[in-house]
Amino acid sequence: MQTLYTLSTSEGEIKSGEPKKLLQQHFDQTRSLLVYLTWFLTEITRYAEKDAHKKASKHLPSAEDLNVNTKLAGNEVMWKMLEDDALKEQFIKEKPELIADKELIRKIYYTLTDTPEYKTYIGTSSREKADEKKIIEFILNDLLLANEVFVSHIEENFSNWDDDGEMVVQLLTGYIQKPGGINFKQMMSPDKEQFAYSLLQAVLEKSEHLQALIIPKLKNWDPERIAQLDMIMMKMGVAEFLYFETIPPKVTINEYIDLAKDYSTQQSGQFVNGILDNIHKELVQQGKMQKVDYKKP
């Protein structure tokens, strides 16, 4: 949807390969966001060593300065993440340190050291797997995602946060549970990626045909006054009706209702629902729901 909208608002002729390239950029932005969140999280845990070194380097360090607890810096979950070759490769490629707010890292770390959760964690010398994961999850959920300053920092650097944030957080939460469990080069399964490319191409190549099915259902609506995003979503929905046999029509309709509510106007969900439902019923009545490949005539 985002790719189609970008293409619809661009000036000039769409060059061959440009749609696929643009869609790939969206996939890459998702990966970049995940890599940065992971890097920032690990930097919080590693700051314990920096804090200890800084305090020990004072001209006249106190006993407290010389005894900073560095257990967090040795967190086993964090180190399994940092030892993941795929993640290390992404850190080198993305260079998250170039956009990092180092002062924010310091402040969040010191906020962490005042929490009961942190004090409980360092209060025992043992390293239970559950405790190692629990403190990392606490930092992510309670000190990063619940921190308005941190979220603002992410929003300033990643325009896709509103769209991809929830999904990326789920991926990171799963990665904490199983370090090494993400293929950073292939952020989604090959079949899902192929579906995205195919749907994009179907809507572009069959745009006039899809619109011809939609316009008669608009009744008193002027097609030119309909929100551009609404028209794009309706085209995508009708394309799924016609060309993608693995997707039940009910699922298609429900998904585009949710998209319309999230991305378009307040009335868009009901509007898109009504149009897609009418088109689906008509296609069924006319026996046109054979779900054939869009490339076939």
Image (spheres, rainbow, N blue to C red):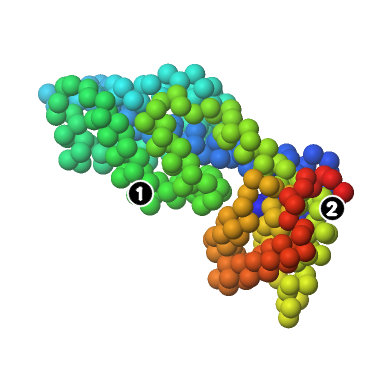
Choose between 171 and 92: the one closer to the eye: 171
Check residue 12 in the rendering and tell me which mark sits there, or answer none. 2
Q: Residue 284, how many percent across, how many down?
A: 71, 62
Report if residue 287 is visible in the image.
yes
Left or right of 51 in this view: 171: right
Q: Residue at x 73, y 40 (%)?
A: 20
Check residue 47 in the rendering and tell me which mark sits there, or answer none. none
Check residue 147 in the rendering and tell me which mark sits there, or answer none. 1
Q: Pointer 1 and pointer 2: residues touching (CB < 8 Å)?
A: no
For residue 40, above or below residue 149: above
For residue 285, above or below residue 249: below
For residue 113, above or below residue 276: above
Q: Residue 99, how many percent across, how many down?
A: 50, 37
The local secondary structure at tag 2 comes to loop
Q: Outermost residue, left direction?
A: 63
Sequence-wise, which precedes: disc 1 or disc 2? 2
Left or right of 77 in this view: 290: right
Q: Callout 1: few (<14), some (14-19), or many (20+) C-alpha neighbours within 10 Å?
A: some
Choose between 87 and 197: the one closer to the eye: 197
Q: Outermost residue, bottom direction?
A: 220
Disc 1 residue type (three-letter): Asn
For residue 27, above or below residue 148: above
- Residue 8: name its quadrant: bottom right
Q: Residue 297, how many percent across, how many down?
A: 87, 49
Q: Residue at x 77, y 48 (%)?
A: 292
The local secondary structure at tag 1 comes to loop
Structural distance between the alpha carbons of marks 1 and 2: 42 Å
Q: Residue 96, how many percent across, how many down?
A: 50, 32
Report if residue 51 is visible in the image.
no
Disc 2 residue type (three-letter): Gly
